[in-house]
Image (cartoon, helix red, strand yellow):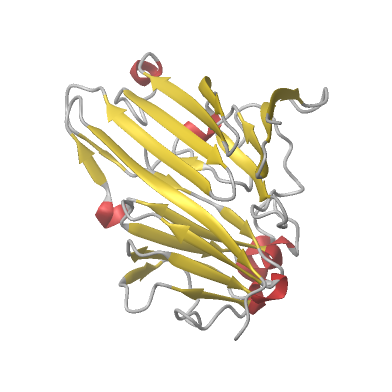
């Protein structure tokens, strides 16, 4: 039985979320940012990481899950990674069948645009999430302004891993990248040593996270997204982030699909852009 319910958090936590319980997976999505914070296929451990220091207060970014980065990525303007992740989205569709449950959210950024100097371009965004043994998510943006505008749509998944020092990445071999951190020890297929990593790759291939500590692979497919971002603050920088515990960096890795930086999208009035990402978990792999 599929059970979709609105969950009101306690009196000290002001945000609301939807709990999803389907025949093949469970999940949770917050209305703020249309942010998925939990997806667990039946028989698997949780796939997404959610920080324990979140206060879940209005307009505060939620650390973990899958934040939506829109209309910009990074620190181009404030807030970091855009305005969409701290605005309330509207639930516009619920589809239930014996195999999956699909939620559709929309954000209509028109009236707000006239009063927001950091992003004066009106747009409409649509986000759809299908919960099953696979998590399939689609982000769509329609530019409603009268002049062209540059968008950097991206998804920012925090994947839960057993120990990042026992994680390796495949699928980025020979892909060009921009290194925004001081780390120089990560190479595709090798792994992490505990230093921070912040790299933006130009790549549209499937990426595999080999999570040896949890005896599983997490595979990210996103052929329409031309960027892949790897991020983890490492031991040195984790302490500078108020919503991360000292040791939290060890238990997650962000592998982010999108179209950012040199792969940003220019939309003319009325034009639309979308990309879809699929996440798959394969357990009990051998041969490592």
Q: Residue at x 65, y 58 (%)?
A: 240
Residue located 34% across and 16% down the image:
114
**Quadrant of the frame with the C terminus:** bottom right
Q: Quarter-wise, where is residue 266 in the image?
A: top left
Q: Position of residue 243 (x, y in %)?
A: 69, 48
Q: Is residue 15 above or below residue 168?
A: above
Judge whether 162 appears above or below 121 on screen. below
Front position in the image: 135 or 160 = 135
Q: Is residue 65 visible?
A: yes
Nearer the observer, 167 or 149 = 167
Name the quadrant containing residue 77: top left
Residue 233 sits in quarter: bottom right
- Measured as percent of width and height from the top left, residue 87 is found at 52, 26
Which quadrant would the N terminus be assigned to in this image? top right
Residue 74 visible in the current orientation: no
Q: Residue furthest top?
A: 111
**Residue located 40% across and 18% down the image:** 112
Residue at x-position 33% and y-position 44%: 152
Side of 129 relative to 226 (left or right): right
Residue 121 pos. (x, y %): 29, 26
Q: Judge from the rendering whether residue 267 lies leftward or rightward of residue 10; answer left or right.
A: left
In this rendering, the answer to whether 207 lies above or below 127 is below
Which x, y percent locates residue 178? 35, 68
- Which is nearer the eye, 145 or 19? 19
Q: Residue furthest right?
A: 11
Q: Is residue 181 left or right of residue 163?
A: left
């Amino acid at each position: 039985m599929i059970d979709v319910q609105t969950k009101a958090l306690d009196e000290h936590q002001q945000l609301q979320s939807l709990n999803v319980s389907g025949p093949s997976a469970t999940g949770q999505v917050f209305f703020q940012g249309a942010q998925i914070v939990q997806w667990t296929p039946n028989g698997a451990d949780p796939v997404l990481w959610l920080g324990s220091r979140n206060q879940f207060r209005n307009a505060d970014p939620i650390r973990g899950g899958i934040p939506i980065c829109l209309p910009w990525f990074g620190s181009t303007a404030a807030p970091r990674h855009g305005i969409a992740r701290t605005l309330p989205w509207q639930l516009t569709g619920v589809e239930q069948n014996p195999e999956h449950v699909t939620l559709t959210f929309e954000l209509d950024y028109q009236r707000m645009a006239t009063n927001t100097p950091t992003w004066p371009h009106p747009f409409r965004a649509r986000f759809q999430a299908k919960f099953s043994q696979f998590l399939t998510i689609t982000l769509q943006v329609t530019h409603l302004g009268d002049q062209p505008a540059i968008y950097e749509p991206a998804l920012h998944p925090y994947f839960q891993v057993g120990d990042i020092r026992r994680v390796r990445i495949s699928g980025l071999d020979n892909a060009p990248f921009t290194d925004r951190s001081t780390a120089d020890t990560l190479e595709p297929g090798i792994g992490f040593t505990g230093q921070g990593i912040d790299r933006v790759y130009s790549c549209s291939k499937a990426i595999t996270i080999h999570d040896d500590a949890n005896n599983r692979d997490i595979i990210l497919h996103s052929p329409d997204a031309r960027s892949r971002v790897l991020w983890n603050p490492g031991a040195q920088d984790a302490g500078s982030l108020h919503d991360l515990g000292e040791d939290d960096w060890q238990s997650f890795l962000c592998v982010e699909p999108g179209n950012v930086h040199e792969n940003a999208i220019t939309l003319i009035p009325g034009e639309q852009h979308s990309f879809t990402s699929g996440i798959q978990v394969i357990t009990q792999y051998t041969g490592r």
